[in-house]
Image: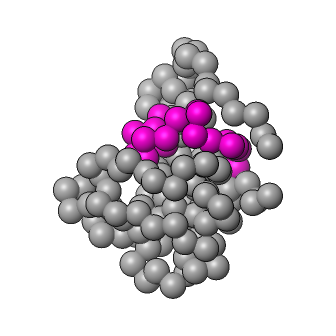
Amino acid sequence: MTAVTAPEAPAPGPVPLERTVVAVVLEWRGRVALLRRGVGVAHDRGRWHCVTGYVDQGSTPEEQAWRELHEETGLGVAELDAFEVGHVISLVDEAGRNWSVHTFRAVTTQRRLRLDDEHDAYRWVRPVAVSGYDNRVAWLDDVLDAAPPRR
């Protein structure tokens, strides 16, 4: 079991790039959480994805990943067995913009999630079944591959 600790306060540093984001793959009992974007969000409405967010100025990607995980699912340190840093990947969207994606894997002991207003549903899915969700975001497979491997 990996020790889980919350990040310390952000240290002053350079301003993150506008398109630097985090993506957290959340697991419970060998399944990954797919979160469905709600109708009130600006992009990817109705699409399945993982926990994501822009890296705020003054935050590290790891700190932002913790913040997004808590905001989007209600989970905190006490509900996690592991939190691991994955690879940073570069993706290009349909408009030709570059995105730097810092990936993470979090393993929870909780089946129930408390969704924020960005999402209207979630599912616990076996990793091999993710490809069956035709309405998932295009980059989800890349993030799943870049996150630390399941143990």
Q: Position of residue 66 (x, y in %)?
A: 53, 36
Viewer-closest of 126 and 7: 126
Please tell me which residue is depicted at 57% across the width and 40% down the height of the picture: 79
Of residues 26 and 85, the one drawn nearer to the viewer in this rendering: 26
**What segment carries the magenta color?**
67-87
Q: Is residue 123 left or right of residue 110?
A: left
The reply to whether residue 55 is visible in this rendering is no
The image shows residue 122, relative to residue 114, as above or below, that is: below
Answer above or below: position of 12 versus 88: above
Percent x, y for residue 137? 44, 70
Q: Is residue 75 magenta?
A: yes
What residue do we see at 58% from left, 80% from top? Answer: 129
Q: Nearer the viewer, residue 117 or 88?
A: 117
Q: Residue furthest left?
A: 40
In the picture, the quarter occupied by the N terminus is: top right
- Give the number of marks: 0
Q: What sort of colour scheme is used for the picture?
A: one colour
Say which residue appears at 26% left-offset and 49% top-offset: 117
Q: Quadrant of the C terminus?
A: bottom right
On the picture, is 77 further left or further right than 93?
Answer: right
Quick check: 141 left or right of 112? Answer: right
Does the magenta segment cover residue 97?
no
How far across and how far down the image is residue 104, in percent? 63, 48
Where's residue 43, x and y in %? Answer: 29, 60
Q: Can residue 94 be seen by looking at this rendering?
A: yes
Residue for point 52% across, 67% down: 124
